Amino acid sequence: MLLIYNIGIGLYFCAIYVASFFNKKAKLWLTGRNNVIYKKFEKSLWFHFASLGEFEQGRPLLEQARKNQPEIKIVVTFFSPSGYEIRKNMPLADAVYYLPLDTAANARKFIEAIKPSAAIFTKYEYWYHYFNELHQKEIPLYVISGIFRPDQVFFKWYGGLHRKMLGFVTYFFVQDTSSKELLQTLGITNVEVSGDTRFDRVWANAQHPTELPVINQFKNNHKLFIAGSTWPDDEALVATLVKDYADWKFIFAPHEIGEDKIEKLISLLPLNSVIRYSQIETNQISLNNYQTLIIDNIGMLSSLYQYADVAFIGGGFGVGIHNTLEAAAFGLPVIFGPNYDKFKEAKDLISIKGGYSINDEPELKATVAYITEDIQRYNETCQVVKDYVKQNTGATKTIADHIHL
């Protein structure tokens, strides 16, 4: 099985190499790993994140480590460009890298350079050679905010190698009881249900959000609908609301902000009613005549939600929805597409009637009407959603106390 795994890693690299000729992300993934000279540390704490979402999820623990152990060197790695390119210069870490491709030689070289006293992986990403090298060197490895489902490879008849990786983990901090029970079916008992550190992150953000006067000016006492982390399928649906809710303001914060993506989104919206955020920054523009604002930058979304009345979270018509908790922390009812099964918080929000999954335009319009037409029901929903987030905080402290951060 290890031979097949190694062949798969090699084939993945080849696929990225070919894609790099015409795909920007693939090129960044490849060039970011070329000829990197790693800083050598006598001791460090290593945090690994798949992408930006996982970084925000694990960030509370990273901040706790920096606060409580200011003397220790912190190394952060990302698998994806969407995490590395945005956070490569962050002051929380002493070094930020792309995770080198998972080969035995790369794992030895990297771990020997940074000499971690412990490694912390957030939610997922299981890399055999890194896990094995940490195990061989008796370096503690923790998985935080982990979540497991029966359809994952660990629980399949052919998942022997991946089950072996689980055996290299010193301790699992999982989001829910079902994850703990699944691990126990494999004989893994070094597990604690600590919850999801994302709740700590989004709750802290909601208590002290960055003020955005331009957004308040754009809203101008109107109701505001925010569509966050959207993809084209999401945008085509939400755009149908704009004419129906002429007295509302709308903000789109697309997941991808390439010029072609923004232009396609603009084409879906009523002519002369839409403005881009970059236009506001560079011109003295009155916002009263615009109904729709497109955020053509990265990093504002978590602060935008403080001004919203309803949120639509993108990704549900693709591989899966993006972060619903950022909006929920402000007490917003959240709407999303049908692909949410891998996200516990989305199921929880649906169960408390604070989250709504839709499949098409009629369902979207009916859902928005249901949420907004009864003001008492709307206010009660907002309070229930906000309480849900608050009640699920505390995972960071549980983990930090256990591993002495």
Image: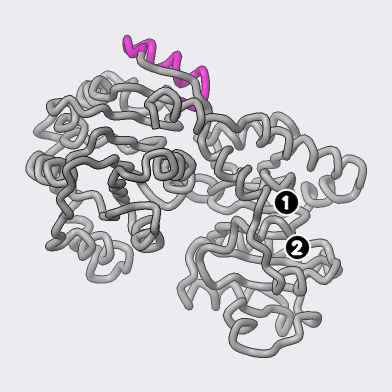
Q: Quadrant of the C terminus?
A: top left
Dot 1: within a 10 Å radius of its alpha carbon, few (fewer than 14), some, or many (20 or more) residues?
Answer: many
Reply above or below: 135 against 355: above
Q: Quadrant of the N terminus?
A: top left
Disc 1, SS: helix
Figure quadrant of residue 191: top left
- Where is residue 146 drawn, in percent x and y? 42, 30
Reply above or below: 335 against 14: above
Dot 2: within a 10 Å radius of its alpha carbon, few (fewer than 14), some, or many (20 or more) residues?
Answer: some
Q: Residue at x 51, y 61 (%)?
A: 255
Q: Is residue 337 visible?
A: no
Relative horizontal placement of residue 275, taking residue 172 as reference (left or right)? right
Q: Earlier in the sequence, mark 1 or mark 2?
A: 2
Magenta range? 174-189
Q: Is residue 375 visible?
A: yes
Give the CA distance from mark 1 to mark 2. Answer: 9 Å
Q: Amino acid at mark 1?
A: Leu
Q: Residue at x 79, y 42 (%)?
A: 382
Disc 2, SS: helix
Question: Which mark, by number, is residue 388?
Answer: none
Instruction: Answer whether labels 1 and 2 touch (C-beta < 8 Å).
Output: yes
- Where is residue 18 drawn, in percent x and y? 19, 63
Question: Which mark, by number, is residue 241?
Answer: 2
State the residue lying farthest toward the front.
Answer: 71
Q: Nearer the viewer, residue 52 or 316?
A: 52
State the residue lying farthest toward the bottom.
Answer: 284
Relative horizontal placement of residue 3, taking residue 308 as reference (left or right)? left
Figure quadrant of residue 134: top left
Q: Residue at x 68, y 74 (%)?
A: 269
Q: Which residue is mark 1?
A: 364
Q: Residue at x 67, y 35 (%)?
A: 390
> Quick check: is 187 in the magenta stretch?
yes
